Image (cartoon, rainbow, N blue to C red):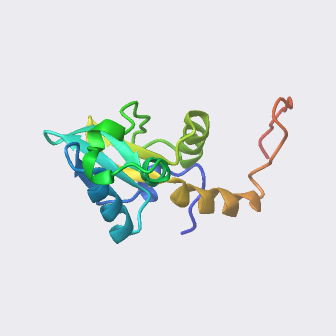
Amino acid sequence: MAQHPDRPVSTIMSWPVATIDHEATLAEAAEALATDDIGALLVLRDHALVGIVSERDVVLHVAAGTDLTHLQVGEVMSGDLVTTPPDATIVSAARLMTDADVRHLPVLQDGLIAGLLSIRDVVPVLTAAVGDDEVVIVPSGTRLIVRGA
């Protein structure tokens, strides 16, 4: 069955999720990102989610000439997490990602990691829906009246 933007994120999220301890070095994070060909790692402290570190974080420090072996993940991670529940719709998660300017969205259920949603997971669903008769793209601010068939 093809995915639709109104389906829950649990249908497209990644599981298992790659994690890293907050005391790991940024060099270890870079290696994990490259080895697993992923864009982000969820950061844990005492088995609890405390942040996220992305390839973007690593590149910033590489570009600055930082010695990645002297920085801990906990020092560079984003601790201001934006999350979503597994029953949120794909389109609502996409809006959340856009509004928060993030490319990775931890999926939490009852405070526990249920998965990770990436922009790579979301875009194919949204682009497939553009040709769908049920989806209409209108400019922002346009006033619409929608009537059922």
Residue at image coords 47%, 41%: 88
Question: Image quarter for residue 78?
Answer: top left
Q: Can residue 74 be seen from the camera position used here?
A: yes
**Left or right for 130, reference 139:** left
Q: Is residue 18 visible?
A: no
Is 9 positioned to the left or the right of 147 in the image? left
Check the image and report above or below for 85 versus 90: above
Q: Nearer the viewer, residue 78 or 126?
A: 78
x and y, in percent, of residue 99 in the image: 60, 34
Along the line of sight, the residue nearer the viewer: 110 or 50: 50
Q: Quadrant of residue 120?
A: bottom right
Query: Which quadrant holds residue 80?
Result: top left
Q: Position of residue 28 (x, y in %)?
A: 26, 58
Residues 33 and 9: in front is 33
Residue 3 shown left or right of residue 27 in the figure: right
Q: Is residue 56 above or below residue 45?
A: below
Which residue is at 36% across, 62% downward?
A: 33
Residue shown at the point (74%, 58%) measured from the top left? 130
> In x, y percent, where is residue 16?
29, 60
> Which residue sits at x=74%, y=60%?
132
What quarter of the picture does the N terminus occupy? bottom right
Query: Between 89 and 145, which is closer to the camera in this rendering?
Result: 89
